[in-house]
Image (cartoon, rainbow, N blue to C red):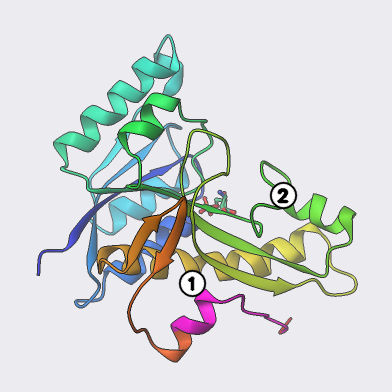
Amino acid sequence: MAKLKVGVLISGRGSNLQALIDAASADDYPAEIVTVISNVPGAVGLERAAKAGIPTNVVDHRDFQNRETFEDALNDVLSAAAVELLCLAGFMRLVTDGFAGRWRDRLVNVHPSLLPAFKGLDTHKRALQAGVRIAGCTVHFVRAEVDVGPIIAQAAVAVLPGDDEESLGRRVLEQEHRLYPLAVELIARGQVRIEGGRAHVLGAWSDDNTALINPLLVTEK
Ligand code: GRF
């Protein structure tokens, strides 16, 4: 069966991009990354893509007068690569209603909190300030509102005594790297349906995947 063509938008180090690249390197993975676009020239993620032989593009938002023309340029690259699913992976630009509408149900993001808690930036700092006992990450479909949209998968991480932003962030990031490739795989296999504003995951998956779909309490240091 043809693999789902995935585009990835990044702005920085691209560790989630790397997780997707690694997953997609398996013959039986149902998706392939066909283009990586960064809005930041010199982003480390671009090197990761190039090393994996994936075509890269820089579309620098500073070269455009407004969000719409910036997004038109993104869409040109994405159309040329025939992208079917677009993954935001540390892409630090807000998208317009128009872009979210054009890519509706074909645009996903990974966010370092258990949404709908802690939308926006500095999630780990705010989670620690709030004294939550469980943190985590979410892969969701993107809507125009920031960090809102049908949730595909979440993984939970225990907050440990003595955690700081860095230590908690590191453990959450490890889970992002497991969760994002899984969510993309489920979409590519046609196992994710959106109904009534919620994403439903269909069909059978392995025991391990079940643990990832359901909140997974990770207690190791
Ligand atoms: C991740 O924490 C992701 O959840 C957030 O931005 C960060 C990107 O990190 N949206 P990386 O560039 O994938 O390493």
The label on residue 118 is: 2
Q: Is residue 171 left or right of residue 183?
A: right
**Magenta segment includes 216:** yes
Q: Position of residue 68 (x, y in %)?
A: 38, 17
Q: For the residues carrying marks 1 and 2, which lies nearer the camera in this image?
A: 2
Secondary element at tag 1: helix
- The image shows a total of numbered marks equal to 2
Q: Amino acid at mark 1?
A: Arg
- At a point 35% along the width and 28% down the height, the residue shown is 59
Question: For residue 185, which quarter of the picture?
Answer: bottom left
The label on residue 178 is: 1
- At a point 22% along the width and 60% down the height, the residue shown is 32
- At a point 58% along the width and 44% down the height, the residue shown is 147
Q: Position of residue 63 (x, y in %)?
A: 40, 15
* Viewer-closest of 14 and 135: 135
Count residues near mark 2 (Cα–Cα under 10 Å), then give few for <14, some for 14-19, many for 20+.
some
Q: Earlier in the sequence, mark 1 or mark 2?
A: 2
**Magenta segment includes 3:** no
